[in-house]
């Protein structure tokens, strides 16, 4: 019984780690389509604050903080994309934004 429970826990942890890897290329496509009207989403974009460029977000926020801001935006004007993103799209967005850190 213990071995079975332990195996289930390990499998779920492995699944969580894999889900958080994301595809940065897909995240870039999503960002260009849904985020570029407000944020500067290009690699090497200038830092700005209102709203912050993705390059600035990458430098000042951890991957978990980025995920939290997508899932639960702190600004009332930011759309709640997390409510209708499918599959690993949030993981993809986090992977793309985090990839911009230089």
Image: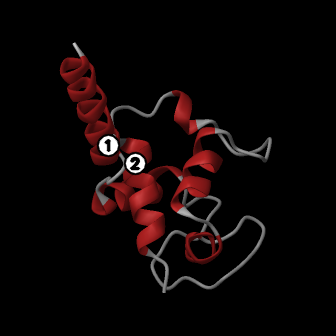
Name the residue nearer the viewer: 75 or 102: 102
Q: Earlier in the sequence, mark 2 or mark 1?
A: 1
Residue shown at the point (44%, 34%) measured from the top left: 85
Residue at the disc numbered 1? 19
Instruction: Judge whether 22 appears above or below 51 on screen.
Output: above
Do callouts 2 and 1 mark residues in contact (Cβ within 8 Å)? yes
Q: Residue furthest front?
A: 2
Residue shown at the point (63%, 36%) measured from the top left: 80
Instruction: Judge whether 35 appears above or below 83 on screen.
Output: below
Lateral position of residue 75 relative to residue 54, left or right: right
Q: Is residue 30 visible?
A: no
Lateral position of residue 28 relative to residue 71, left or right: left
Name the residue nearer the viewer: 74 or 61: 61
Give the secondary structure at mark 2. Answer: helix
Which of pointers 2 and 1 indicates the residue nearer the eye? 1
Instruction: Judge whether 17 appears above or below 81 on screen.
Output: below
Q: Quadrant of residue 52?
A: bottom right
């Amino acid at each position: 019984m213990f071995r079975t429970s332990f195996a289930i826990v390990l499998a779920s942890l492995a699944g969580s780690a894999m889900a958080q890897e994301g595809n940065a290329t897909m995240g870039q496509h999503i960002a260009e389509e849904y985020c570029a009207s407000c944020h500067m989403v290009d690699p090497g974009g200038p830092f700005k604050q209102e709203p912050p460029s993705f390059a600035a977000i990458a430098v000042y926020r951890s991957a978990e903080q980025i995920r939290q801001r997508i899932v639960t935006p702190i600004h009332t004007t930011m759309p709640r994309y997390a409510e209708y993103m499918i599959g690993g799209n949030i993981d993809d967005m986090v992977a793309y934004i985090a990839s911009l850190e230089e």
